[in-house]
Image: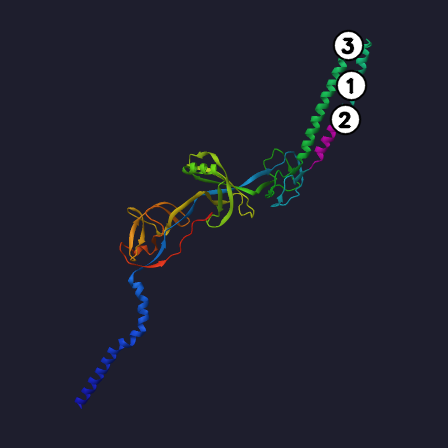
Amino acid sequence: MRVIGLDRSMRLAALCAGLVLACPAVLAPALAPALAADAPASSGIPVTVAKTQRQDVPVWLHGLGTVQANYVVAIRPRVDGTLTDVPVKEGQDVTKGQLLAIIDPRPYQAILDAAIAKKQQDEAQLANAKADLDRYASLARNDFASRQQLDTQKSSVKQLTAAMAADQAQIEAAQLNLSFAYITAPFDGRVGLRSVDPGNVVHASEQTQIMSVAQVQPISVTFTLPQDVLPRVTAAMAEGTLPVVAFASDDKTELDRGTLLTVDNAIDTSTGTIKLKATFPNAHRTLWPGQFVRVRLLLGTDRDVVTAPTIAVQRGPSGLYVYQVKPDDTVAVQPVTVAREEGGLSVIAQGLAPGVPVVTGGQSRLQVGTRVAVRDAAQPAAAKAGS
């Protein structure tokens, strides 16, 4: 009985050993695709690669600016009186010469009427004095009037002539004050918030404005740049008009495009910056007075320069370098000199030729001679206007 039991155990052990030896042969076909898929990853460190290329790269100067109304005026009274009417609404667009406010004109109309009447009275007296002068002159020629009477009459005519001139001046002053009672827009613009309501008495000596009018189409932006770029800016201005692009504070949302108007006549010694002014059409009113914006000024374009993605450029103890992928899929360290950066691109002054593959992702695991598994990266385009 014990011998039979031992033989059965030995047969079971042999059967299990055969199954174990057979498993690799059975599982190998199923595992082959997975092993094949893992083969490239195990052959090198995965990296993304882009090629250097020649292209035109615009030269942008970046600054911070503030939007200003092209024109702005505080509407204040120039004569005393009761504000009787404000025929415009807050926030309304107005045109040059449009009526904005009315101060009670009746007192000034009365003064004008009195001045006109005074002139008419002096005109009648002057006409009579001239007639008397003609008569005295005729009598004096026949010695029927004295020379003194003739001279006295000439003096009366001159006095009345001067009075007529004074009357005319009074009329013009009264007309001017009467016109001040009707306040009109000095230019096309937009009305701000009203500070004085109709019915209030206003005075010419008051500093409180009735309202303000600002011109927002076109509109201006003042911004600053480092003083070191001034020679380049003035040289570019001499060649033509320079485009300017305004962005929101996120430096991504484009608000409007305009042109550089002028450069200030002095450098700010406290900050070492120069102030510039640009004008924008502001057709969609995306710019508003007092708004903070980021400004880019286009100086020109660098033609046919070698560029590489900025993310490919690394900084080491000896300076800037890139990982260059060699034909055998290993990497080498290539020192480079970067002239400038713009829109995700670095302009390479020295160290790289066009068409060279450089690593743009996965550099942290690389050393000289490391084998890599290459994946192509999206190539950054040359920075367009404002990008």
x, y (%) of residue 137?
Answer: 79, 13
**The label number, if any, that marks residue 147 in the structure image:** 3
| Quarter assignment of residue 186 | top right
Q: Which numbered dot is residue 130?
A: 1
Which residue appears farthest toward the top when viewing the image? 143
Any magenta on residue 109? yes
Q: Position of residue 233 (x, y in %)?
A: 45, 38
Residue 61 seen? no
The kind of residue on which mark 1 rests is Lys
Q: Residue at x 81, y 13 (%)?
A: 138
Q: Position of residue 244 (x, y in %)?
A: 49, 43
Image quadrant where one finds the N terminus: bottom left
Question: What kind of residue is marked 2?
Answer: Gln
Q: Label 1 near label 3: C-beta < 8 Å?
A: no
Q: Amino acid at mark 3?
A: Arg
Q: CA distance from mark 2 to mark 3?
A: 30 Å
Q: Quadrant of residue 127?
A: top right
**Mark with earlier residue (2, 1):** 2
Q: Nearer the viewer, residue 55 or 20?
A: 55
User: Which residue appears at 80% of the width and 18% of the height?
Assistant: 131
Q: CA distance from mark 2 to mark 1?
A: 15 Å
Residue 120: mark in rendering = 2
Label 2 SS: helix
Helix, strand or loop at label 1? It is helix
Q: Earlier in the sequence, mark 2 or mark 3?
A: 2
Q: Residue at x 29, y 62 (%)?
A: 43
Q: Is residue 124 above or below residue 258?
A: above
In the rendered view, tell whether residue 124 sits above or below residue 91: above
- 234 relative to 20 in the view: left or right: right
Pointer 3 or 1: first along the chain: 1
Q: Point out the stretch of residues depicted in magenta.
A: 104-116
The answer to whether one can see residue 201 in this image is yes
